[in-house]
Structure formats: structure tokens, C-alpha cells
Image (cartoon, rainbow, N blue to C red):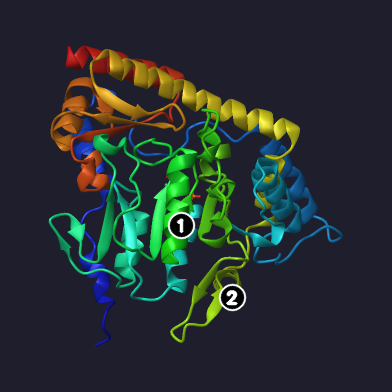
Amino acid sequence: MIRLNEHFAKLKASYLFADIAKRVNAYVAANPDKPVIRLGIGDVTEPLPPVCIAALHAATDEMAQRATFKGYGPEQGYAFLREAIAQHDFQALGAKIDADEVFVSDGSKCDVANIQEIFAHDVRLAIPDPVYPVYVDTNVMAGRTGVNRDGRYEGILYLESTAANGYVPAPPAEAADLIYLCFPNNPTGAVATRAQLTAWVEYARRHGAIILYDAAYESYIRTPGIPRSIYEIEGARDVAIEFRSYSKLAGFTGLRCAYTVIPKSLKARDAAGQEHAVHALWNRRHTTKFNGVSYPVQKAAAAVYTAEGQRQTRALTDFYLGNAKLIREAMTKLGLACIGGDNAPYIWINTGRDSWEFFDLLLNRAQVVTTPGAGFGKCGEGHVRISAFNSRENVINALARIAAALK
Ligand SMILES: *Cc1c(COP(=O)(O)O)cnc(C)c1O
């Protein structure tokens, strides 16, 4: 009989959010009179900005007329969107990124998951802990790791993010080839300074490594001087790929649009030592396996770059950051150490006890759902993540209940 890809069997049996759902569903079934507030899963709650809705409607009308109908578009994205991205998201920051270095896609999760397939099987991986699970699991599926022992896969260099380093890992002493970084971070909400990112870019240049920079939460940065793009760092064009998404910026989690930047100066070598442009390889992969984001969705994404779109998306992220501020202040008042929430929609709480125990305590005594840090990696133990993606009313109620429960 046909055999399976056995690397999938190395994946940890249960998925974090399934575990959480199981506990929450059991609680709700046993306590139908106690409404639960979910500050767990990182999905947005507010509707799309009006500029995006208007663009979607207008593009839909274009699709209804023979003269303006669009079939397959360019796999890499329409020029109107790629040019707006290059200009507003990079050139405006002084970062030299051209429109043809941008690949539009239907999500950063897929991009960050798929990118590993263009690199060799035996590249040395460096992945943060705690972490967005996609980076680890896709490399496990691809067979780049050994088995999971005691919560860690053999063959991954874990970059520990703890209270001791302010949840921003410094480059390790060992050499790595493929490095995953995410700032502002999910789950911790930590941001990296220019000096910290510069150290990573210098490390990558020294080792001929590539940094995969996930900037899905870039639009939440408010502290002046914190880099929004890795390409603000000198020399990053030669060592970094950046992932951006409209999901958390403009509420596109259900509409789906994102992009990946691969500078043409980014090189990798083949087995014979010959250098190749990574851009060309990804272009080949993208055009073979992907057929472009729908025209109306790309029009909706482009609307984000209009003056009105900039105001509306800023108001949206300001709203979530307002929630984050309330959460952080309430936790601090309760004497809990936490980070995040200033430049990210997540607050990372150092609970001082087992993270599932603290999760259960908040569920049972306050009917508030959080995310146990242990689900994001070994270094997440002792922490919970609280998400600011909710209505103001739910956040205020949840915080009052938590305060009463922990008194
Ligand atoms: C939400 C999120 C993304 C964006 O994913 P999409 O597929 O674009 O919705 C990427 N990276 C991280 C860390 C995220 O939390």
C-alpha cells in the first residue's frame, strides 16, 4: 500500500487552539448560564474599513462588464498594488525596495510556510521560542528535524525569548543558515530596536544566512525609532526576506491578502558553490504553484494606501491598541509582570505559575479565555497571551472579572 510522509507523524499530536477549544467547550457545556469572553485566538473582530468595502464593490462591478472583466492576473500581483506597496511601505521609509521585488499572495501564513521549500534539506534552522507555530511545523513536515523530545525538535537551534533578554533573542554563538524572526512578536508583543536588528543583519551577513522577517504586526508600531521593516537596516537587502499582511493591518483575515518581499540582491548557492538569485527561484515557485490573488481583493488592498485608507486603518489599529493599553494597565495593577501591548495587539503575562493552570483559573473563575504560553514553546511556560482583538465592552468586562477573580 502507498506510504505516507512520515515526517508528519513527528508533529505534536494536538494543536494548541484545539486543546483550548476542548476546555472552553467543556466549561460552557457545564456552565450554560456563564457567558465566556474570548481573549485567546489572534483574529480581528472589527469590520473592514469603508475604503476597502467601496473598492471591493467597484471592482465587483468591473467584473460584471465585458469591457472591464478580468481573468487571470499576474501571479505576482497587479502592478497598481505592487507599486503602491514599494512606494508606501518601503521607499517612504528610505528602504530601497522596487515593485518587482514584491510578491502579492493570499496570506502570510502560506508564504512563511512555503518559503522553506526553496532551501536545501540540510540547512541549519534557527527559530524563536516561544513562536508562531507555522515556522516550526512546516520544517518538521519537510523533514528538516528529528523527533520531538521534551517539547523540542532535534535539529532546530531555538532562540530563547525570556524575561532575561527582554523577550528579544540576540544572535547565537553558533552558525545558522535560515533564521526566523517576527517583530512585533506574536505571541509576546515584543519589538526589536534598530541596534538589535542590526546585530541580526550583521550575523546573517557574517554567516551567509537568510533572515525570514515576519512583520505581520508592523502597523501596530507606535514608538518612534522602532524599525517597521528589516530593510531599514543597512545591508538587509542582501540577507532578508520580509513578510507583510493586510490581516492585522486592515482586518483582511477573512478577505485574504498579503505579500512577500525578496530583494533581487539576495543570493544563495547551489551544491557546486554557484550563486543564484533567490528572487528568481521564488518567482518560479510562485508562478508554478499560485495563480494570483483575486482582482477585487487586490483593489481592496490598494485602497489601504489612499489618504482615506491610511486614516481608516490607523483608526482601526489605534482602537485595538486602546484595548491593549487597558489590558496592560489592568495586569500591571494586579501585580503581574507583562510586556507587549504598546506596539502590538498582544500582552504577554509572566504569571509566575504553570501556564495551563493560570489559563484554567481565568476560565473557571473569570470566564475569560486566554492562550497558555506553553502552547507556543518551552519558553512560553509560565506565561499567558492576552489578545486585544475584541470589542471595548468585552475587554472592559473581561478585565473587571479577572480583577475580581484574582483578588
Ligand atoms: C496573523 C499572522 C500572520 C498573518 O497571516 P495571514 O495568513 O496573512 O492572515 C503572519 N504571521 C504571524 C506571526 C501572525 O500572527
Q: Is residue 20 above or below residue 71?
A: above
Give the camera-side residue of 61 and 9: 9
Q: Which residue is mark 2?
A: 284
* Figure quadrant of residue 113: bottom left
Which corner quadrant holds the N terminus?
A: bottom left
Image coords of residue 333 (percent x, y): 28, 13
* Figure quadrant of residue 402: top left
- Judge whether residue 31 can be spotted in this image: no
Q: Is residue 364 above or below residue 112?
A: above
Q: Is residue 241 above or below residue 348?
A: below
- Judge whether residue 360 can be spotted in this image: yes
Which corner quadrant holds the C terminus?
A: top left
The kind of residue tagged 1 is: Leu
Q: CA distance from mark 1 to mark 2?
A: 19 Å
Say whether mark 1 is within 8 Å of ligand 1.
Answer: no
Cβ atoms under marks 1 and 2 closer than 8 Å: no
What residue is drawn where x is 33% and y is 59%? 126
Q: Mark 1 or mark 2, which is nearer to you? A: 1
Q: Which residue is mark 1?
A: 212
Instruction: Please report whichever mark, 1 or 2, sits nearer to the chain's N-terminal start.
Output: 1
* Label placed on residue 42: none
Image coords of residue 384 (percent x, y): 25, 34
The kind of residue tagged 2 is: Arg
